[in-house]
Amino acid sequence: MAIPESDETPTLLSDLSLEDTEILSPQQMLNEFKAVNICAPMVRYSKLPFRQLVSEYETHITFTPMILAQEFSLSEKARDSDFSTNEAERGTFLMQESRAPSPNCVSRPKRKVRGSLIAQFGGHSPFYMGHAAALIKKYVDGVDINCGCPQQWAYKEGIGSALLRKPDLVRDLVRSIKGTCGEDFPVSIKIRIDDDLRNTSQLIKTAIQANASMITVHGRTRRQASSHPVDLESIKFANQEAQSGANGLIPVVANGDVFTLDDANKTREICGVHGVMSARGLQENPALFAGYDRIPLAGIERFLTLSAQNGFMFPLFHRHLADMLGPWFSTREEKKFFNMLSSPPSVIDFLEETYNIQPTPLPEIIF
């Protein structure tokens, strides 16, 4: 794990100081505030520079990519490769309380709150899940168990969506993390809906009985591709099931087809959830939760600087920029030309000449 020591104050676009900032668990944030926005765990994509970027545009909770629990437990090399963080990556936000205002107050109060970072693990061994969580505990604000990855390799390995119909194993995974990290340590699960919603209900209730802190629901089944419309009514059902138990308020997060702030608000309204998560939408527009139709050029410049400061493999750095620049390309030829660039200097030259973008410092030593 790369955990640099730093006393630097986060540089945020919101320019909020850290004085009097509350540090809350993800569950507390979701229960106490309106319109909580979340960056999904994305294979390869939700690495440190990208997480820090979206945190500067009203994304309150971020997830790491899925990390394989067994490999993380056994291999220092895997730990160094799979996880890095710094003190600046969590944003600082003015958040509006979800409770109704008092009779003497016209509007809901706002509070200054630090964002949260959640590490997501994939695995089917309670032992390795608990051990991996213990290793990463002091660097994150919670651990999430991937119960929804639809990729065939994951299903064959017995992880991700292979857990959707194994509620007892999910219970054991949650309890193992609680056992190594403490009962108060936040543990969540991220699931997909089942063809038979009775299975979804059983999984949710079993996870809650195991003391899961929150549940994220992707509104597609494991067999449905991203081209299939997300099923908001099924997410709504899952949310209702989570609130129907006797274990108190369990926050539910909706995931799927959130590409604009309007999409996020529609999802909140229909599903009645505590938070909304985006993956592909943020990948294309890291500023979507701040209400932008496309990321400002200043945001792209900021991404270059964050990549330089934290280190980034060139293919991933290039792919991120290609996604972000999509709405900015004026012609297909320009997009094709950018996609053919093969080195950091060529990318930097293109951005400077085309958009007058230049990072400070220049990324001379990354990739």
Image (cartoon, rainbow, N blue to C red):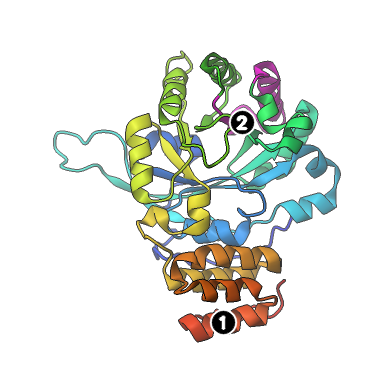
Q: Is residue 296 above or below residue 93?
A: below
Residue at 60% from the left image edge and 53% from the top image edge: 46
Could you tell me which residue is drawn at 76 percent across and 28 percent down?
Answer: 158
Which quarter of the picture shows residue 97?
top left
Name the quadrant of the C terminus.
bottom right
Type of the residue with mark 2: Arg
Query: Where in the figure is residue 69, as x and y percent of width and height?
Result: 76, 38
Q: Nearer the viewer, residue 131 or 61?
A: 61
Secondary element under disc 1, as helix, strand or loop, is helix
Residue 143, horizontal then vertical, whole percent: 63, 38
Q: Which residue is mark 1?
A: 350
Residue at 56% from the left image edge and 56% from the top image edge = 51
* Amino acid carrying mark 1 in the image: Phe
The region drawn magenta spans: 165-193
Secondary structure of the residue carrying tag 2 is loop
Residue nearer the viewer, 345 or 86: 345
